[in-house]
Image (spheres, grey):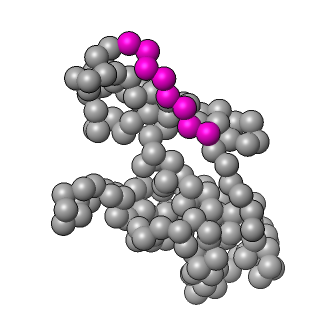
């Protein structure tokens, strides 16, 4: 089995921690060398304690689902003999409240726009490719969030 590593680090840099007045900015580091600024979702804490330039965990979940679906879709399209020239997605995550009152990402809408080479799948074939990609996507298989794929073109 493969391992997938990420290092998340945060350090207190002033403020009043015990009063909730501290920066939530943090750093994500990945084993391939990428470094990303992490931050809370803008609506979760006052603006003074976050940074909208950072990636929040909810956005990262949406991006991970979108990226995994895309990579798996490219593979299944290749296996089916369809050449993909471009794939863009406008993925959107929606949050809801559980009965306990806790928030969760309850739905992610993937809205891919795909450009094919000379052989374009029929609508039914493309739907089948998306269905197979969703079934084989490791990230989608790892969450209970509803993931919808809605074509844009």
Is there any visible trace of residue 115 in the rendered image?
no
Is there any visible trace of residue 146 in the rendered image?
yes
Residue at position x 19%, y 57% in the image: 101
* Of residues 55 and 153, the one drawn nearer to the viewer in this rendering: 55
Instruction: Quadrant for residue 132, please give it.
Output: bottom right
Measured as percent of width and height from the top left, residue 33 is found at: 74, 36
The tally of labels here is 0
Residue at position x 33%, y 35% in the image: 42
Image check: 95 left or right of 31? left
Image check: 133 left or right of 10? right
Image check: 15 left or right of 81? left
Q: Quadrant of the N terminus?
A: bottom right
Measured as percent of width and height from the top left, residue 53 is found at: 47, 28
Q: Quadrant of the C terminus?
A: bottom right
* Of residues 121 and 73, the one drawn nearer to the viewer in this rendering: 73
Up the image or down, 11 lies above or below 76; here it is above
Residue at position x 54%, y 60% in the image: 65
Instruction: Quadrant for residue 69, please give it.
Output: bottom right
Measured as percent of width and height from the top left, residue 39 is found at: 44, 33
* Of residues 47 and 124, the one drawn nearer to the viewer in this rendering: 47
Q: Residue furthest top?
A: 14
**Magenta-colored stretch includes residue 12:** yes
Report the magenta residues as a range.
7-14
Q: Main secondary structure of the magenta part?
A: loop
**Magenta-colored stretch includes residue 143:** no
């Amino acid at each position: 089995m493969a391992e997938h590593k990420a290092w998340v680090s945060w350090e207190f840099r002033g403020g009043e921690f015990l009063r909730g007045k501290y920066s939530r900015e943090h750093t994500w580091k990945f084993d391939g060398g990428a470094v990303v600024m992490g931050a809370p979702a803008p609506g979760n804490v006052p603006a003074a304690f976050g940074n909208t330039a950072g990636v929040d965990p909810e956005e990262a979940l949406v991006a991970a689902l979108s990226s995994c679906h895309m990579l798996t879709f490219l593979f299944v399209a290749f296996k089916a003999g369809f050449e993909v020239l471009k794939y863009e997605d406008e993925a959107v995550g929606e949050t809801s409240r559980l009965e306990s009152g806790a928030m969760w990402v309850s739905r992610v809408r993937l809205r891919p726009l795909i450009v094919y080479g000379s052989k374009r799948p029929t609508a039914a074939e493309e739907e089948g490719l998306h269905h197979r990609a969703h079934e084989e996507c490791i990230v989608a298989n790892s969450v209970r969030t509803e993931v919808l794929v809605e074509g844009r073109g």
